Amino acid sequence: MKVLKFGGTSVGSVQRMRDVAELIYAPELRRIVVLSAMSGTTNTLVQITRLLHDGDLTAATSRIEIMRQDYHMVARELLPDETVAAAALKQLDSIFRAIFDLTRQPLSASGERVILAQGELLSTYLFHQYYTGILQREAVLLPALDFMRLDADDEPDAPYIREHLAAQLALHPELQLFVTQGYICRNAQGHIDNLKRGGSDYSASLIGAATDATEIQIWTDIDGLHNNDPRVVPNTYPLRELSFDEAAELAYFGAKILHPSSVLPARQYGIPVRLLNTMQPKAPGTLISSKTGQEAIKAVAAKDGITAINVKSSRMLLAHGFLRNLFEVFERYRTSIDMITTSEVAVSLTIDNATHLPQILEELRRFGTVEVDEQQTIICLVGNLVQANHGSAYRVFEALKDLPMRMISYGGSPNNISVLVHTADKVQALRALNDGLFRTAPPSTFSKTEGELALKKLLAGS
């Protein structure tokens, strides 16, 4: 069994849906295909819920109707057979009627989650109709709401997922292809919920773990994780291999291609995760597994929206329990800490969620003088930073010698060096690190013949 997840851009148009249908066609291999909503759909659904919360019913219903017409156009182009198209249009109208029905009363949190779930239901339904009705290939549409569930702590209920997914698959022992939704699930009360934004990656990983998959493939619009941010740094290149820990660090600290939680179930069961490009399917992408290479520093990522807090107090000196009391403030407001450094009289730390910042600062002033720096960015350098790899920190500081650094964190993880800079210096810092650490890219040329062989192996399971 392989699990293949395709993101919103991969199914963002009629042609791309057709391309995905050809990519997944491998009759001899059992696969589960996980689809996101078509690109732009979830953002539109979020806009609709905000309009409803604001009481702007006219604008909300107008936006729903425009969206309904857009999906009618997609269905007519994707499904040229009149009989198939007619059935699809009827189903689409049923979905949008359910959305319209939710506008007739004040929108609850439960109703909002129902609206947000419709994007994946739309994309999987249309794709399945194309695959079975137009291409005449066998596939089963598995409703994620029948097996994907959260527990009472809003965490994925792994035993439930494994049991109920196995039961669904057992109903079709002779079939090789299953299509299901990413992102959406039910909560412990049985109500429609979701795995939060980016959760389709998480869905794929949970499904891979539940089925003991041989590999999880995450197909997006970029050819793997890059060694730096290609949006602002020239001459970046995709990484061929990363360990689970390295990938998790990069995802958490800003690598947009991968959801931070998505590698956790795969890591637990040792299932390789391969990041691939739907637009360049012959490219090798990035393989994430239990293995790690010898490179001391492999990649750089940046996380914006950081607030730095410094607490200075002479009472800290030799004070038992000081740090515990400090951390309890953040625990009370459910605010995570990213970086922390300490001295005898001060603690500096960072947070990425400033929702409760005024309340946190008020409590921290009981401990001493508090200073706050906003508009900060964490630059994370990831690799195999074990003690045997000498000189890694020196290379980082040498590259950043002309830039002010607010904080430095090194040694807490064998995979991470983090520095804090002002967001205005982020691009300069990323480019300086690229020049200082990755002056030459590793060989990444991939001949046409090699590409075709690699793609054939990926999709055939060899």
Image (tube, grey):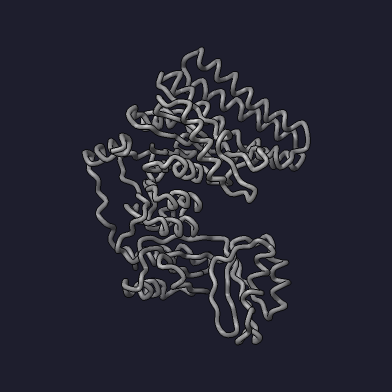
Looking at the image, which residue is at 50% across and 27% down? 141
State left or right for residue 136 relative to residue 111.
left
State left or right for residue 133 relative to residue 453.
right
**Image quadrant where residue 69 sits:** top right
Residue 301 in the image, given as x and y percentages of width and height = 44, 60
Q: Quadrant of the N terminus?
A: top left
Looking at the image, which residue is at 36% across and 52% down? 289
Instruction: Work out whether residue 19 or residue 57 is closer to the camera in this orientation and state it.
Output: 19
**Image quadrant where residue 213 sits:** top left
Instruction: Work out whether residue 247 or residue 229 is closer to the camera in this orientation and state it.
Output: 247
Q: How many marks?
A: 0
Q: Farthest residue toward the top?
A: 83
**Does residue 324 lie above or below 78 as drawn?**
below
Instruction: Work out whether residue 274 or residue 421 is closer to the camera in this orientation and state it.
Output: 274
Instruction: Work out whether residue 292 or residue 19 is closer to the camera in this orientation and state it.
Output: 292
Residue 335 in the image, given as x and y percentages of width and height = 63, 62
Looking at the image, which residue is at 67% across and 60% down? 355
State left or right for residue 260 relative to residue 18.
right
**Image quadrant where residue 144 sits:** top right
Residue 99 in the image, given as x and y percentages of width and height = 67, 30
Looking at the image, which residue is at 69% across and 64% down? 332
Residue 432 in the image, given as x and y percentages of width and height = 39, 67
Q: Quadrant of the C terminus?
A: top left
